């Protein structure tokens, strides 16, 4: 196995792991990197620089709840005839490291248990009649490929350092990696280097309590977090701790510029949700300085005593330090801000919804989440919970049966009341049905908005199993351009060739959307949301599609159709969002009325960006 000191490249990730080894209160390190970058090798090699007795536990993606948090040891329970408790993976990682590869693909239930353990420092085991508390304080190391999806924001909030995503394309570095793996030109002094590194970390641990940070430096980090739109207060605390750990590694008692830069790169910049304000914009917001009256001699103020005056050296330090902090921040931000910063902001808005989208309990399919009492014919039997339920009564039942029949013909006696039935959670995701008004002068603008919004929603479809459908309405009737799908390319192709112009058959769009939603629900989709991008001015009757000689419908008849369709949509549990892109001075309030009929939400977003529409649909 390749040692920590032999790994080529990923220097920033190495620094983050060393800071964590110095100060475990940083919580952990998340390393996003492409396939084959060596992130997993580096994470596992982290054990090389830790004390020998430190637990290093790897969590498999398919871990079950009983293995994760603990529960009853079935084999020991059956053997002893009394309940025997088995500790879970989270408890076994106490005082050490919990490593999760492909963190973004970890089941939402497991993520929730990890978050709870990190917050409490313990695991609460409340299952199958068992109630215990197991200690569980650990450092979390997570690696994942960003193309597989995002990591749940609530979990990232509890982890101190997130290594900025980088790609390894340097020829020399790649050559060194190949030589190292094949045993050529590898380090001959690996053991000595590891001993030196361990000694450095131990010395840094002793130095850490003596490291100090000035108030100006602390304020600068906090202001940086505010400027970057970093949410929550944990990041501020992590940034301060990271800067101090960096100083301790360098055997210093004071935090300097390099420590602040490193804290910015590893803690604040990866959590940025916006670009910081430029200096000109900040100056515009500041109140103008008051000028001294021309007839006032300058010597008067210089000679007069002032209770609020400060020492010149102190005043110079107060003026220079914030400027230095701001310069450091801008230098780090310009080079480290991720390209997909708007996607990070969008993911942050979704964090309260993660782990609960489109999940429903059933007895036949999905992920096994728990067991409950029931009859064997009502579902699948949960064998282990059934055996656990029967185990404590075996001795008494055998005595009773021997007394009644004179002998016992079976090694295990299970009664009807012992039977436990499996309960599954079917995570089928949400179907977003986009209904895009392709009529009128604003059609081209709506197409651009819809295309961007569909793309943003599909970015997370892999993780949440969400689907998107596209309906266009123009002329006399609506048209289903894209059935429920997760194909980004197909959605874009359909939007690119979408014709525009003509009337507004809004009723036809709602009817087609309702039929699409009904079909999707028969295939297991439990949640459907309509995202209607329109000004709400329906002027084509649904009745005219089926009756060729029907007279032109009046405005009142069209309104009656919309009212009836909206009531049906609401009654069938379909959520709705109406995005009004009409300019305010042209609006007659039709879109807000449509949202009210549908029992949904209304957003007035003229010239809306794709991110805003996606946020509106996901909020």
Image (tube, helix red, strand yellow):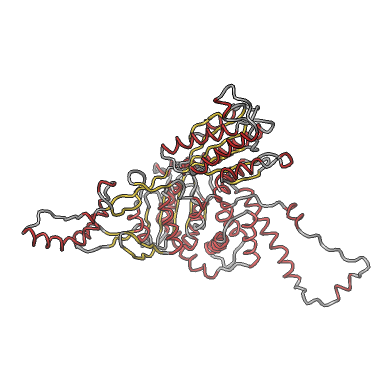
Does 244 sit left or right of 193 as displayed? right
Of residue 470 and residue 506, the one placed in the foreground of this image is: 506
Of residue 399 and residue 322, the one placed in the foreground of this image is: 399
At a point 52% along the width and 31% down the height, the residue shown is: 482
Q: Position of residue 497 (x, y in %)?
A: 59, 26
Q: Quadrant of residue 521?
A: top left
At a point 61% along the width and 62% down the height, the residue shown is: 256
Q: Quadrant of residue 283?
A: bottom right
Q: Position of residue 367 (x, y in %)?
A: 36, 47
At a point 44% along the width and 43% down the height, the residue shown is: 526
Q: Is residue 359 visible?
A: yes
Q: Position of residue 60 (x, y in %)?
A: 37, 49
Of residue 70 and residue 250, the one placed in the foreground of this image is: 70
Question: As displayed, is residue 58 above or below residue 299?
Answer: above
Q: Is residue 34 visible?
A: no
Q: How many marks?
A: 0
């Amino acid at each position: 196995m390749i040692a920590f000191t032999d790994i080529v490249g990923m220097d920033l990730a190495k620094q983050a792991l060393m800071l964590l080894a110095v100060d475990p209160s940083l919580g952990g390190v998340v390393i996003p990197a492409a396939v084959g970058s060596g992130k997993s090798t580096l994470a596992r090699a982290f054990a090389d620089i830790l004390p020998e007795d430190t637990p290093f536990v790897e969590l498999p993606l398919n871990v079950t709840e009983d293995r994760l948090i603990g529960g009853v040891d079935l084999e020991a329970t059956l053997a002893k005839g009394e309940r025997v408790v088995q500790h879970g993976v989270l408890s076994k990682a106490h005082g050490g490291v919990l490593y999760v590869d492909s963190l973004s693909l970890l089941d939402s239930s497991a993520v929730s248990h990890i978050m709870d353990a990190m917050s409490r420092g313990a695991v609460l085991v409340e299952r199958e009649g068992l109630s215990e508390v197991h200690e569980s304080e650990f450092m979390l190391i997570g690696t994942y490929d960003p193309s597989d999806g995002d990591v749940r924001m609530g979990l990232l909030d509890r982890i101190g350092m997130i290594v900025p995503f980088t790609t390894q394309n340097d020829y020399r570095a790649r050559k060194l990696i190949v030589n190292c793996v094949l045993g050529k030109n590898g380090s001959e002094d690996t053991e000595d280097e590891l001993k030196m590194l361990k000694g450095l970390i131990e010395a840094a641990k002793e130095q850490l309590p003596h490291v100090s940070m000035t108030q100006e430096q602390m304020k600068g980090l906090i202001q940086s977090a505010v400027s970057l739109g970093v949410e929550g207060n944990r990041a501020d605390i992590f940034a301060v701790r990271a800067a101090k750990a960096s100083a301790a590694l360098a055997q210093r008692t004071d935090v300097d510029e390099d420590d602040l830069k490193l804290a910015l790169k590893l803690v604040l910049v990866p959590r940025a949700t916006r670009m910081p304000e430029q200096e000109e914009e900040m100056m515009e917001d500041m109140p103008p300085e008051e000028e001294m009256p021309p007839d006032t001699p300058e010597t008067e103020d210089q000679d007069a005593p002032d209770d609020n005056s400060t020492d010149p050296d102190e005043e110079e330090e107060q003026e220079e330090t914030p400027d230095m902090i701001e310069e450091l921040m801008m230098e780090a931000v310009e080079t480290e801000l991720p390209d997909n910063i708007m996607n990070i902001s969008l993911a942050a808005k979704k964090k309260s919804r993660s782990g609960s989208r489109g999940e429903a309990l059933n007895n036949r399919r999905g992920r096994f989440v728990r067991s409950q009492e029931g009859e064997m014919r009502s579902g699948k039997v949960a064998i282990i919970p059934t055996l656990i339920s029967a185990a404590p009564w075996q001795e008494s039942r055998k005595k009773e049966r021997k007394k009644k029949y004179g002998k016992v013909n079976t090694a295990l006696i299970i009664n009807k009341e012992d039977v436990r039935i499996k309960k599954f959670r079917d995570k089928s995701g949400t179907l977003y049905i986009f209904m895009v008004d392709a009529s009128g002068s604003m059609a081209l603008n709506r197409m651009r908005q819809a295309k961007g919004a569909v793309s943003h929603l599909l970015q997370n479809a892999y993780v949440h199993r969400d689907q998107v459908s596209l309906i266009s309405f123009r002329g006399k009737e609506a048209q289903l351009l894209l059935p429920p799908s997760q194909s980004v390319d197909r959605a874009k192709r359909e939007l690119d060739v979408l014709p525009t112009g003509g009337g507004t058959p809004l009723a036809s769009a709602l009817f087609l959307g309702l039929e699409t939603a009904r079909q999707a629900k028969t295939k297991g989709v439990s949640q459907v949301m309509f995202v209607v991008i329109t000004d709400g001015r329906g002027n084509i009757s649904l009745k005219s599609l089926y009756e060729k000689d029907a007279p032109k419908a009046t405005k009142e008849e069209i309104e009656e159709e919309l009212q009836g369709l909206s009531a049906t949509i609401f009654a069938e549990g379909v959520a709705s969002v109406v995005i009004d892109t009409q300019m305010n001075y042209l609006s007659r309030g039709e879109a807000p009325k449509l949202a009210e009929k549908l029992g949904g939400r209304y957003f007035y977003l003229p010239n809306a960006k794709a991110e805003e529409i996606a946020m509106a649909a996901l909020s």
